[in-house]
Image (spheres, helix red, strand yellow):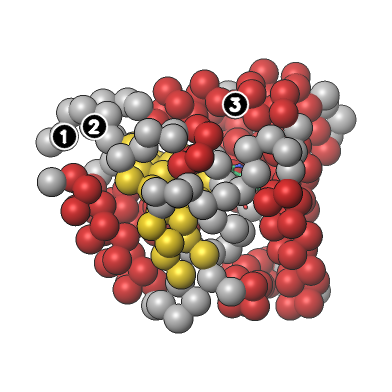
Amino acid sequence: MNVKPFTIALDGPAAAGKGTIARALSEHFSMPHLDTGLLYRAVGYKVSQGKNPLQAAIDLTEGDFANPSQLRTRIAGEHASQVAAMPEVRAQLLEFQRNFARRNGGAILDGRDIGTVICPDAEVKLFVTADDRTRAQRRFDELWPNDPTLTYDAVFADLQKRDARDASRDDAPMAQADDALLLDTTKLAIDAAVAAAVRFVQEKRT
Ligand code: DC
């Protein structure tokens, strides 16, 4: 087993497939995975209940995102994107993410700024993307069973708005690191996307 730190950074826009790929890599390589979007979703959720954003980030514990189904809703995603644009919130969440990333045995983190800001020295960087309509369809298929009033157009509009905010904020905007491999999953079945990611990690491990 690899006992040294070995960080795998996966970034990309909403619903591109990075979470699915990160979970598959976590299983394949037996490395812990942190979905960093959940940190912002948990802070956003507390803020939507009246808490101050910085205080919500300071008080955040692992228990707040251990049970993520209530955080994976459409509205929680919007709240997350709003608090994620606040530099004081991002600064407060930085150390937890870096500590997770550098644990012995390796770790996988997915988000928007992992390869650029949180772990610029990550051993593996992937930027996972897909075209806008494909991503909106995937997110719609995921959310619709729990919310049959939802329309594809509403999901598409949400994603466009959220991506624009995430990519244009001043602090740690969503971006592909110069040394990240671009993985476009528009025309890739999930198995093929995972296989490509596994191959890339294996090359970097040897
Ligand atoms: O990956 P997600 O959809 O769960 O992320 C929710 C929001 O959190 C997303 O709109 C942007 C923000 N986010 C971020 O700014 N930085 C990260 N590393 C992860 C998520």
Disc 1 marks a residue whose amino acid type is Asn
Question: Badge 3: how crowded within 10 Å, few (<14), some, or many (20+)?
Answer: some
Whether residue 195 sits left or right of residue 80 in the image: it is left
Disc 2 marks a residue whose amino acid type is Gly
Q: Which mark is residue 65?
A: none
- The mark that comes first in sequence, 2 or 1, is 1
Q: Quadrant of residue 73?
A: bottom right
* Label pair 1/3, CB-CB below 8 angstroms: no
Residue 32 visible somewhere in the drawing = no
Residue nearest the observer in this picture, 198 or 69 = 198
Tell me the residue that label 3 is attached to.
Answer: 93
- Residue 100 position in % (x across, y down): 41, 28
- Residue 98 position in % (x across, y down): 45, 26
Task: Say which element carries label 1.
Answer: loop
Q: Quadrant of residue 30?
A: top left
- Give the residue displayed 39% in from the left and 72% down from the top: 190
- Residue 182 position in % (x across, y down): 43, 62
- The mark that comes first in sequence, 1 or 3, is 1
Whether residue 102 sits left or right of residue 45 in the image: it is left
Tell me the residue that label 1 is attached to.
Answer: 2
- Give the residue displayed 61% in from the left and 32% down from the top: 64
* Label pair 3/2, CB-CB below 8 angstroms: no
Disc 3 marks a residue whose amino acid type is Leu
Task: Say which element carries label 3.
Answer: helix
Residue nearest the observer in this picture, 9 or 120 = 120
- Give the residue displayed 63% in from the left and 21% down from the top: 92
- For the residues labelled 3 and 2, the Cα–Cα distance comes to 22 Å
Tell me the residue that label 2 is attached to.
Answer: 105
- Give the residue displayed 78% in from the left and 77% down from the top: 153
Residue 75 visible somewhere in the drawing = yes
